Amino acid sequence: MIITIDTNVILAALISNQGASHFILQLILEEELKLALSTQVLLESDDVLRRPEIKSLHGLNDSEIDDLLDTLVLLAKKHAIYFRIRPNLIDEGDNLIFECAFTSSSEYLVTSNVKDFQGAEWKGAGFKVLTPSDFCKEWRSQHE
C-alpha cells in the first residue's frame, strides 16, 4: 500500500511516541507501508522541521533531522512531478502533497488537516484523504 503523508503527520510522530502519527511512521520505517515522496514534498518537510519554533517542539538537531529525512528517502517510492495538478488549495504546501499523492497513485493522503484538502478543485483524484487516526482504523481493520 502506498500512502502520502503531510508534514504535520511527521511532526506529530516526532513530538510524541504515542498515537496514530507515530504508529504510521513506525509502519513506514518497518516497511509495512510504502511512502510516496517527491522532491517538492521532501523540501517542504525539510523546511518545516528546521524552523526554530518547530525544532523546539520535536527537539531534534540538524543531524537528526538529516538522518530521519535520509531514512525516509531511502525507504520511499520516489516520484518526479513533471506537471502541476493544481487543485488550488489555500496552502501551497498542501498543493505539493496533493500532487505527490496523485502522481504516486497513493491509496491515501494522510493529514491532520483534512479540511484543508476539502476545497480542492480537482475531484476524483483516486485517493482518500484521512486523518492519522482514521487511517489507523482502516489499517487495523485490514491487517489485524
Image (cartoon, grey):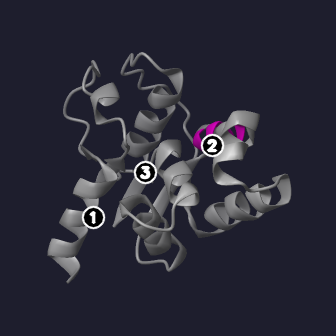
Q: Which residues are magenta?
A: 41-47
> Taking 26 as reference, is 64 left or right?
right
Q: What label does residue 45 carry, if any?
A: 2
Q: Nearer the viewer, mark 2 or mark 3?
A: 2
Vertical comparison of 139 with 10: above or below = below
Residue 81 position, x and y percent, is 54, 38
* CA distance for labels 2 and 1: 22 Å
Residue at 36%, 49% (x, y): give it.
110
Vertical comparison of 102 with 10: above or below = above
The residue at the far bottom in this view is: 144
Residue 120 in which image quadrant: top left
Of the image marks 2 and 1, the number of the one nearer the N terminus: 2
What residue type is disc 3 on?
Thr
What residue type is disc 1 on?
Cys
Of the image marks 3 and 1, the number of the one nearer the N terminus: 3
The residue at the far left in this view is: 141
Q: Which residue matches tag 3?
A: 4
Q: Which residue matches tag 1?
A: 136
